[in-house]
Amino acid sequence: MYQYVGDEVIIVWPEDKAGRYSNWLTCYEAMRVALEKRSPVYQKRYGLVPEFKAGVHGGLVIITEIGTLQRAHVYHGDVLNTASRIQSKCNEVGYDLLVSEFLMSEVHLSRRKEFEKVGVVPLRGKTEEVIIFGFDKRIQQVDVKASSVSS
C-alpha cells in the first residue's frame, strides 16, 4: 500500500509482512536497482539521474478510505511523522537509508552487518531521541587539488 505526499512516497506493510521478511529493505534495494538500470535514459533525457533517500520506522498506522467513485487510502499516525523525521537526517549523517532501532530488531541476522549504528539522534518535533542505523552510505566526494613536486 502506498500514498504520495508531495515529492514523498509513503509505503506501508502489515507488520507480519514488513518486519519478519524485511520487505522494506527489499523494496528500497529494488527501487535503487530500477533507477540504476534507467540512469542512462534519465541522464540523456533530463541531464541528471534521480536520487532518493529513505527513513524507515515501525508502529501503528491509521488507514482511512476517502472518495466515492475513485477511492484511495490515506495513512495517518506518529510512525509516519517519525519516519519522515528520520529520513530528514540522511544528508546530515551521510546515508541514503536510515532505520530506527525499532525496526533493526526485525532485520535478519545475516543482513545486520550491512548496517552501521549512527547513534542517538534528536528528531525535530519529538521529545524522545531515536537510535538510528545507516545503510547504503554515500561516497563522499572531496575536492582535492593535486600537485606535484619535481626537483
Image (spheres, helix red, strand yellow):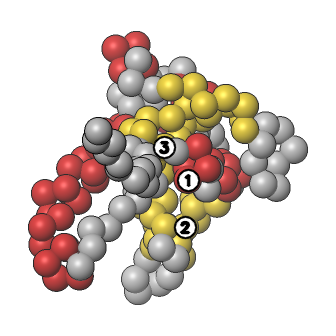
Residue 107's x, y, as percent? 44, 23
Residue drawn at (62%, 40%), measured in percent from left and top? 59
Quarter of the view holding residue 42: bottom left
Q: Are marks 1 and 2 in contact (CB under 8 Å)?
A: no
Residue situated in front as seen by the camera: 92 or 25: 92
What residue did someone put label 2 on? 74
Q: CA distance from mark 2 to mark 3?
A: 28 Å
What residue did someone put label 3 on? 95
What residue did someone put label 1 on? 91
Seen in the picture, residue 45 relative to 78 is either above or below; the reply is below
Q: Residues within 10 Å of mark 1 (few under 14, many from 20)?
A: few
State whether residue 105 appears in this view.
Answer: yes
Residue situated in front as seen by the camera: 35 or 56: 35
Q: CA distance from mark 1 to mark 2?
A: 28 Å
Residue 151's x, y, as percent? 29, 39
Residue 64's x, y, as percent? 58, 65
